């Protein structure tokens, strides 16, 4: 069976990862897909998994990260290739890749002629900043909640900002500088199956639209 790739794009904090989870959950509940028919791959998860596997590559990545350096596009591409082509799912959702022009060409080489859909979650940066500056995580149990509480609603643990969240302004700048032009190239490479959903609407609403319109052909039995 031919593998299909769905690329989720959007700024950091746009909620694209949540959109992907919501898409899978809705499709499973409505019986349009079976378990394991669709997976989400995020490069962050791939890197964490490789380190945990204690492979030679995992050790190499660990030492690069411990030195405070970035994992190269080449290493990410090799991880992605293996996981994308060898996972048993019919549909693979990519979350957070590609982010640079180099990664756009790596991805094109990896996926060849397989069908690609691009879904962009368009969330204004003011809204992202507002949401993220109000988001806290419990140091003790990891529950994510808003800053309106003095301490964790489930365990009274201390609420802190996630490291990633604290750096949101920097990440948004990098996104505008590096990723926006890369996504332009990506859309030019696959112009027929690109769509945009409004990041201000609930993910559930966007998912209903995606299933009934741009992605409908994937679930016709
Ligand atoms: Zn807690």
Image (spheres, grey):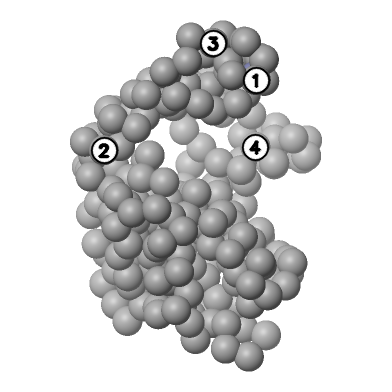
106 vs 144, nearest the viewer:
144
| Front label number (1 vs 2) | 1
Q: From the image, tell me which residue sits under label 1.
A: 154
27 vs 38, nearest the viewer:
27
Q: Secondary structure at mark 2?
A: helix
Q: Is residue 74 left or right of residue 170?
A: right
Q: Quadrant of residue 187?
A: bottom left
Q: From the image, tell me which residue sits under label 4.
A: 48
Q: Secondary structure at mark 1?
A: loop
| Front label number (4 vs 1) | 1
Q: Secondary structure at mark 4?
A: helix
Q: Residue 127, which numbered label?
A: 2
Please give the name of the residue rendered at 54% of the width and 56% of the height, measured from the top-left corner: 22
Q: Quadrant of residue 83?
A: bottom right
Please give the name of the residue rendered at 56% of the width and 54% of the height, measured from the top-left corner: 21
Q: Position of residue 151 (x, y in %)?
A: 54, 10
Q: CA distance from mark 4 to mark 1?
A: 27 Å
Q: Residue 179, which numbered label?
A: none
Q: Quadrant of the N terminus?
A: bottom right
- Mark before the other along the chain sequence, 4 or 3: 4
- Mark before the other along the chain sequence, 4 or 2: 4
Given contact means CB atoms under 8 Å apart, are the residues at marks 1 and 2 in contact? no
Q: From the image, tell me which residue sits under label 3.
A: 151
Mark 1 CB within 8 Å of ligand 1: yes
Q: Secondary structure at mark 3?
A: loop
């Amino acid at each position: 069976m031919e593998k299909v790739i769905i690329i989720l794009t959007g700024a950091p904090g746009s909620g694209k990862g949540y959109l992907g989870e919501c898409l899978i959950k809705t499709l499973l509940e409505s019986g349009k897909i079976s378990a394991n028919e669709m997976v989400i791959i995020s490069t962050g998860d791939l890197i964490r998994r490789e380190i945990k596997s204690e492979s030679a590559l995992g050790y190499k990545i660990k030492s690069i990260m411990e030195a405070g350096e970035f994992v190269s596009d080449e290493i990410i591409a090799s991880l992605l290739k293996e996981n994308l082509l060898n996972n048993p799912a019919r549909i693979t959702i990519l979350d957070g890749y590609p982010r640079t022009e180099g990664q756009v060409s790596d991805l094109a080489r990896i996926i060849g002629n397989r069908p690609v859909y691009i879904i962009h979650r368009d969330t204004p940066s003011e809204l992202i900043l507002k949401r993220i500056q109000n988001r806290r995580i419990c140091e003790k149990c990891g529950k994510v909640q808003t800053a309106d509480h003095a301490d964790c609603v489930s365990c009274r643990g201390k609420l802190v900002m996630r490291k990633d969240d604290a750096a949101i302004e920097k990440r948004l700048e990098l996104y505008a500088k590096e990723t926006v032009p890369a996504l332009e190239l990506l859309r030019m490479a696959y112009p027929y199956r690109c769509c945009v959903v409004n990041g201000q609407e609930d993910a559930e609403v966007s998912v209903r639209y995606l299933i009934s319109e741009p992605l409908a052909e994937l679930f016709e039995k």
